[in-house]
Image (cartoon, helix red, strand yellow):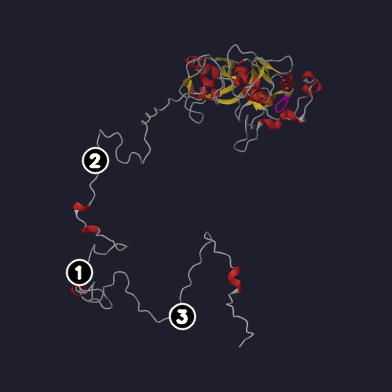
Amino acid sequence: MTTDKKPSTLKLNPGAAKKTPADPFAPRRAPVRPPGPARAKSVSASAPKPPREPSPGFGAKRAGTESERNERPRYGADRPGSDRPAGPRPTGDRPRSGPAAGPRGDDRGWSERPAPRRTDPRDPQPHGAGDRPQRGPSAAPRLPQPHRPDLARVGNVRGEIRLNKRMADLGLCSRREADEWIARGWVLVNGEPAVMGMPVAPDAQVEVLPQARHQQAGQVTILLHKPMGYVSGQPEDGHEAAATLIGAPSQWRGDARHPADGRRFAPEHTRGLAPCGRLDIDSVGLLVLTQDGRIARQLIGESSGIEKEYLVRVHYAPNGPQGAGVVTQNVQAVFPADKLALLRHGLSLDEQPLKPAQVDWMNPEQLRFILKEGKKRQIRRMCEQVGLHVVGLKRIRIGNVVLGNLPVGQWRYLGAGESF
């Protein structure tokens, strides 16, 4: 008997044939944890908590006597809620991780400890030498270097000095002007542009370009008849600086009608004016203010020997200006001659001897001082040492420039034919 049944065939999963082999380098997934016992639900933070017993404060005595506290079980089954065996707490018997855990702690005897290996001096490579790099010979300790002062100040073996000081010594300009000219490229040393702070030899050729000469020609020097109550430099103690008097209204009319070299007043003439030699607040007379560094160096430089002439009105006060025996009239007749000699030479200020001075009587109440130095309040302090009290001081000459008939509080330019 024949049947028309088709032979049965085993059907495979159609997706299995298309499944790509697993990538051996792909990251593995974490295994799925089998479902365990249900976890306890977390207690809400808002749920009420049971009240806690207040803990004893610092220093409070604990319950029970001292003997009872010492007899309380600490380890083993005697302690309530503990599953440990009774007896003293074991030490050193806990095995390390792994099946082959050996003894540790004090259970290991001295024989089990590895003995340190001693290095044989004949061994060319001692133990562990290959694991660490070889050290070279230790460097010798560095000796402290002696302090070397600035060569530009004291010079070196070739006698070189800073360029700005060299230019000031040559009378070309001041050090500040020299630095400004060097920065602008207006100075050449041996035909090459100069560099700020460079040292130069004594035989070096220093050349200044015409731009610097033109700028220097525009600088002014002003002669002022300083009144009383003004300070020579910056304002202090509520007193104004004498430079505030410089302006067109206070220029002397004689100088305005015949200005030096046809120069007219300009606001830039008041910028950078530096007083050359101070006058006290209560002193009057000739005060020089200049923009030219050469003139400032000539008048107040360390090597300046310019004469300064003063008229000084004095009282003889051997016991002080407020003491007894003050002589205000005909002081020359009562003033000792030996003290006049001390004024000329022999006094010291600030523990430094003063240079010789010319001191003479102009009239019975007035002296004339000619000094070649200018210490602070020098004439007043000199007179105090010999019993004289200064009641008036006026400077009438600086070098070859005289105050003349310049009115108090007015000023004029230094003439083209004038020099100190």
* Disc 2 target residue: 118
Does residue 284 sit above or below 40 in this rendering? Answer: above
Q: Quadrant of the N terminus?
A: bottom right
Residue type marked 3: Lys
Residue at image coords 37%, 34%? 135
Q: Quadrant of residue 359?
A: top right
Q: Amino acid at mark 2?
A: Arg
Give the mark nearest the N terminus, 3 or 2: 3
- Image quarter (top left, top right, bottom left or bottom right) of the C terminus: top right
Where disc 3 sits, the SS reads loop
Q: Are marks 3 and 2 in contact (CB under 8 Å)?
A: no
Residue 21: give x, y in percent of width and height.
Answer: 56, 64
Q: Provide the residue span drawn in magenta.
A: 406-411
> What mark, if any, has residue 88 been given in the picture?
1
| First of labels 1, 3 by sequence position | 3
Camera sees residue 312? yes
Using the image as rendered, state which of residue 168 and residue 309 is in the foreground.
168
Q: Position of residue 38 (x, y in %)?
A: 44, 80
Is any part of residue 327 visible from this angle? no
Residue at mark 3 to residue at mark 2: CA–CA distance: 63 Å
Q: Residues within 10 Å of mark 3 (few under 14, many from 20)?
A: few
Q: Is residue 119 above or below residue 155?
A: below
* Neighbour tally class for label 2: few under 14, some 14-19, many 20 plus, Cα within 10 Å: few
Q: CA distance from mark 2 to mark 1?
A: 42 Å
Looking at the rendered structure, the kind of residue marked 1 is Pro
The correct choice, above or below, for 80 with respect to 89 in the image is below
Q: Nearer the viewer, mark 2 or mark 1?
A: 2
Q: CA distance from mark 1 to mark 3?
A: 39 Å
Which residue, given by chain and number where applicable, does mark 3 sit on? 41
Q: Is residue 210 left or right of residue 23?
A: right
SS assignment at label 1: loop
Q: Position of residue 394 (x, y in %)?
A: 63, 23
